[in-house]
Amino acid sequence: MQPVKMYSTQVCPYCQHAKALLKKRGVEAIEDIRVDLDPAQRTRMLELTGGRRTVPQIFIGGTYVGGCDDLVELDRQGGLVPLLAGASA
């Protein structure tokens, strides 16, 4: 299983939804980077995502997935499980 990294905040319902979907698809551990606790991480998130300011911002392995809506759409199209397994997006 590919490592999953998510930039999030504590009170974000989209972050909670994304985490629930990932866990439903077998992800046991998510590197949760809380941008509400560390402003430097928000700056890093902006750099990595081309300026996207909303959370969550999700990375699976070396692939930038995007936000919650992007993750849900990837799953709907059948691409999430293969990406988690190591296939390229």
Image (cartoon, rainbow, N blue to C red):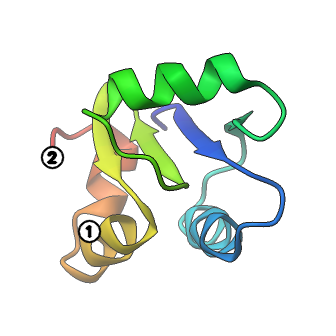
Q: Is mark 1 on a helix, strand or loop?
A: helix
- Quarter of the image for residue 72 reads bottom left
Depth check: give the residue in front, 25 or 52: 52
Asked if residue 49 is positioned above or below residue 67 in the image, the reply reads above
Spatial CA span between label 1 and label 2? 9 Å
Depth check: give the residue in front, 22 or 49: 49
Residue 45 in picture, x, y percent from top left: 48, 29
Q: Name the residue under label 1.
A: 74
Residue 83 in picture, x, y percent from top left: 29, 48
Q: Which residue is drawn at 81% across and 66% down?
A: 11
Q: Are marks 1 and 2 in contact (CB under 8 Å)?
A: yes
- Quarter of the image for residue 56 reads bottom right
26 left or right, relative to 60: right
Q: Which residue is drawn at 52% across and 31% down?
A: 3
Residue 1 in picture, x, y percent from top left: 49, 38
Residue density around tag 2, few if under 14, some if 14–19, many if 20 or more, within 10 Å:
some
- Count of picture labels: 2
Three-letter code, disc 2: Ala
Residue density around tag 1, few if under 14, some if 14–19, many if 20 or more, within 10 Å:
some
Asked if residue 49 is positioned above or below residue 81 in the image, the reply reads above
Three-letter code, disc 1: Leu
Q: Mark 2 points at which residue?
A: 89
- Quarter of the image for residue 68 reads bottom left
Q: Earlier in the sequence, mark 1 or mark 2?
A: 1
50 left or right, relative to 58: left
Q: Residue at x 18, y 78 (%)?
A: 77
Q: What element carries label 2?
A: loop
Residue 25 in picture, x, y percent from top left: 53, 66
